Image: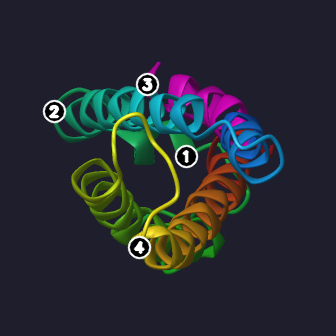
């Protein structure tokens, strides 16, 4: 169940992220951008926590992937390779995201406006957005190879 929830959630997160970036970059809606990012960060933190609890204690994803032509039990196959690539993005992304949000909350004025921190924020926010997008795309590839392909 949580595999499906996270899969679908990422279809909402990527456009939400794009809208938030558009609002700050082109519409100068700094405070709305701030709150959209904080809400997204909290929702993602809760979703990823629930997902990890489910994966570690309740769901045997390898058993669910057994029907995939790309999965061979005990072998280094396309499913495991796609999972490894996904984890290269999925593990550091929340850390970068937390860093960006905490720094923004600490260093931007309230209500949010451009400041001396803006240049550093733009750099790290771009990295975070790229990492989030790559986390989503590689997650979708893993999901397809492990659970959809037949």
Q: Secondary structure at mark 2?
A: helix
Whichever of callouts 2 and 1 sits on the residue coming sooner in the sequence is 2
Q: Residues within 10 Å of mark 3 (few under 14, many from 20)?
A: some
Disc 4 and disc 2 in contact, CB within 8 angstroms: no
Whichever of callouts 4 and 1 sits on the residue coming sooner in the sequence is 1
Counting from the top left corner in percent of width and height, residue 93 is at 41, 64
Disc 2 and disc 3 in contact, CB within 8 angstroms: no
Based on the displayed image, in which of its 4 quarters is residue 142 positioned?
bottom right
Q: Secondary structure at mark 3?
A: helix
Number of callouts: 4
Whichever of callouts 4 and 3 sits on the residue coming sooner in the sequence is 3
Please name the residue that numbered disc 4 is placed on.
116
Marks 4 and 2 sit apart, C-alpha to C-alpha, by: 45 Å
Whichever of callouts 3 and 1 sits on the residue coming sooner in the sequence is 3
Marks 2 and 3 sit apart, C-alpha to C-alpha, by: 12 Å
Which residue does the image show at 81% across and 43% down from the upper left? Answer: 150
Question: What are the residue bounds of the magenta stretch?
Answer: 1-14
Marks 3 and 1 sit apart, C-alpha to C-alpha, by: 18 Å
Badge number at residue 66: 1
Please name the residue that numbered disc 2 is placed on.
57
Whichever of callouts 2 and 3 sits on the residue coming sooner in the sequence is 3
Based on the displayed image, in which of its 4 quarters is residue 23 positioned?
top right
Question: Quick check: is 31 in the magenta stretch?
Answer: no
Direction from residue 116 to residue 136 in the image, left or right:
right
Q: Secondary structure at mark 1?
A: loop
Marks 2 and 1 sit apart, C-alpha to C-alpha, by: 19 Å
Viewer-nearest of discs 2 and 3: 3
Badge number at residue 2: 3
Query: Which color scheme did the rendering employ for the protein?
Result: rainbow
Which residue does the image show at 29% across and 55% down from the upper left? Answer: 98
Counting from the top left corner in percent of width and height, residue 92 is at 35, 71
């Amino acid at each position: 169940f949580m595999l499906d929830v996270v899969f679908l959630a990422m279809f909402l997160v990527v456009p939400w992220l794009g809208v938030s970036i558009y609002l700050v970059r082109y519409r100068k809606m700094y405070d709305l951008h701030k709150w959209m990012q904080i809400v997204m960060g909290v929702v993602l933190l809760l979703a990823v926590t629930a997902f990890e609890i489910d994966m570690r204690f309740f769901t045997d994803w390898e058993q669910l992937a057994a029907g995939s032509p790309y999965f061979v039990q005990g072998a280094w196959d396309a499913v495991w390779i796609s999972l490894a690539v996904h984890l290269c993005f999925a593990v550091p992304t929340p850390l970068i995201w937390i860093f960006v949000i905490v720094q923004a909350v600490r260093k931007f004025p309230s209500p949010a406006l451009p400041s001396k921190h803006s240049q550093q924020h733009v750099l790290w926010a771009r990295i975070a957005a790229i990492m989030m997008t790559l986390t989503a795309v590689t997650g979708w590839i893993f999901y397809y190879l492990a659970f959809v392909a037949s």
